[in-house]
Image (tube, rainbow, N blue to C red):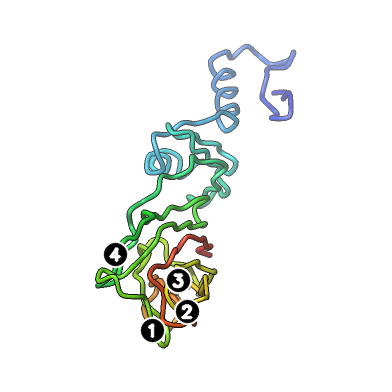
Amino acid sequence: MATIGYAQLPIPAGGDSPTVPADIADLAEALDPHLVQFATNQADRDSKYATAPAQTLVIATNGTSWVKTSSSTNTWATIWEPLQDWQNLITLSAGLEQGDVGLGIRVKDDKHVYLKGRVQRSDNANLQDANAVNLGAVPAEMIPDGLRTWAGTCSMGGDTTDGAGRLEVLGSNTSSSYGDPGDILWWYQGTGGTAWVDISGDYWMD
């Protein structure tokens, strides 16, 4: 049988005997990997297309789009997904509470984590420690592979003149006397501590 186009679709040639049902079936089978497939969500995608060939394109109901990168394993790359809403999944340490800016965390592109919000003490005292203050923790599914750090802003009220400190999220391979993997640590050298810390920042999980 002859083929046509970049996809090498099978078509009967002049000398082929007329086997219309078989020819249509061959064409449909050849077309199938090049069609856009549909799923309700990721779980539905995995249920329906785990054995599909590489380069299969699947679009979910919310527009999330994946392309399969392996013919032998259920491995996919995300082409596009809608921006996730802020999730209330940050756990604060005892004695701490949310400040004037609400806490939130979300993931983009499967591996990029964003945080926002302010943390303060419930008794209105300053956040202060000779070493690190353990502010709380990110959820288990957002713990990075290794230590992640960024600059965090803070209140400049009172005696302090330092408007920023260092924020850390302990990684899965991190050993620390100040917390466990996933814990958020605040390091600050300003005089007298600070009334609140803004944890807004981002890190990569891999």
Mark 2 residue element: loop
Mark 2 or mark 1: whose residue is earlier in sequence: 1
Left or right: where does residue 11 sit relative to residue 158?
A: right
Q: Estimate the spatial distance between the alpha carbons at disc 1 and disc 3, rounded to whole Å.
A: 17 Å
Q: What residue did someone put label 3 on?
A: 169
Residue 79, position as x, y percentages in the image:
57, 42
- Are the residues flagged by discs 4 and 2 in contact, CB closer than 8 Å? no
Image: 88 above or below 4 = below
Q: What residue did someone put label 2 on?
A: 188
Q: Quadrant of residue 22?
A: top right
Q: Amino acid at mark 3?
A: Val
Q: Estimate the spatial distance between the alpha carbons at disc 4 and disc 2, rounded to whole Å.
A: 19 Å
Q: Residues within 10 Å of mark 2 (few under 14, many from 20)?
A: many
Q: Residues within 10 Å of mark 3 (few under 14, many from 20)?
A: many
Mark 3 residue element: strand
Q: Estimate the spatial distance between the alpha carbons at disc 3 and disc 4, rounded to whole Å.
A: 18 Å
Q: Which mark is residue 129?
A: 1
Q: Amino acid at mark 1?
A: Asp
Image: 106 above or below 25 = below
Mark 4 residue element: strand
Q: Residues within 10 Å of mark 1 (few under 14, many from 20)?
A: some
- Are the residues flagged by discs 2 and 1 in contact, CB closer than 8 Å? yes
Q: Estimate the spatial distance between the alpha carbons at disc 2 and disc 3, rounded to whole Å.
A: 15 Å
Q: Amino acid at mark 4?
A: Glu
Q: Estimate the spatial distance between the alpha carbons at disc 4 and disc 1, rounded to whole Å.
A: 17 Å
